């Protein structure tokens, strides 16, 4: 899963092991004591190598969506039927990736117009699941968001890529 950034510089990563999944979080932020250096570069990341992508909230998505490769990665994950999860301001990346037209989604209220203008059918709910797409509004929605994202990872069929 891609976390807070894809860039040409060495990223930070933290692996979390659980019984069925290995999660890879990347970040361009330095100074986190629990992070380790990761040699991931934008060109080296392929949707074929991941089961899902989680776009974080906050203002990071406004920076992430400025990178065509990040948008393309999200678009490829969606085209392959893999988990695309996004919370808070994260749907800004989904707008830029062009994957919201005709889909049900939610987001932080301040970007609702962007999500609607990208073609989504907005729903004001703590979590909205539309096939492989999982969206939530705000940090208070994290429990439902995480449960739904894990359910999609476990149950969703993945299309041939």
Image (cartoon, grey):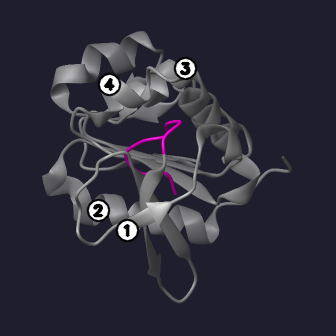
Q: Do the residues labelled 2 and 3 touch (CB within 8 Å)?
A: no
SS of the residue under disc 3: loop
- In the picture provided, is 103 more to the left or to the right than 56? right
Q: Mark 3 points at which residue?
A: 101
Q: Mark 2 points at which residue?
A: 144
Q: In this view, does 84 lie above or below 25?
A: above
C-alpha distance separating marks 1 and 4 = 25 Å
SS of the residue under disc 4: helix
Instruction: Give the numbered dot on residue 62.
Output: 4
- In the picture provided, is 31 more to the left or to the right than 161? left
Which of marks 4 and 2 precedes in the sequence? Answer: 4
Whole-percent x and y of residue 117?
A: 40, 10
Q: Are marks 2 and 1 in contact (CB under 8 Å)?
A: yes
Judging depth in this view, the residue of 42 and 151 nearest the camera is 42
Whole-percent x and y of residue 108?
A: 21, 33
Instruction: Give the numbered dot on residue 3.
Output: none
Whole-percent x and y of residue 122?
A: 34, 27
- Comparing marks 4 and 3, which lies closer to the viewer? 4
């Amino acid at each position: 899963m891609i976390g807070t950034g894809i860039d040409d510089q060495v990223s930070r990563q933290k692996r979390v092991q659980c019984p069925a999944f290995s999660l890879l979080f990347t970040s361009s932020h330095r100074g986190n004591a629990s992070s380790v250096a990761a040699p991931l570069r934008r060109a080296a990341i392929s949707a074929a190598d991941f089961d899902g992508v989680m776009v974080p909230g906050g203002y990071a998505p406004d920076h992430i969506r400025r990178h065509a490769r990040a948008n393309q990665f999200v678009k490829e994950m969606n085209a392959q039927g893999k988990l695309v999860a996004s919370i808070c301001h994260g749907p800004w990346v989904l707008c830029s990736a062009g994957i919201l037209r005709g889909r049900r989604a939610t987001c932080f209220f301040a970007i609702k117009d962007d999500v609607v203008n990208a073609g989504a059918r907005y729903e004001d709910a703590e979590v909205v699941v539309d096939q492989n797409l999982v969206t939530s509004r705000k940090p208070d929605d994290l429990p439902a968001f995480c449960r739904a994202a894990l359910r999609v990872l476990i149950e969703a069929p993945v299309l041939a890529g």
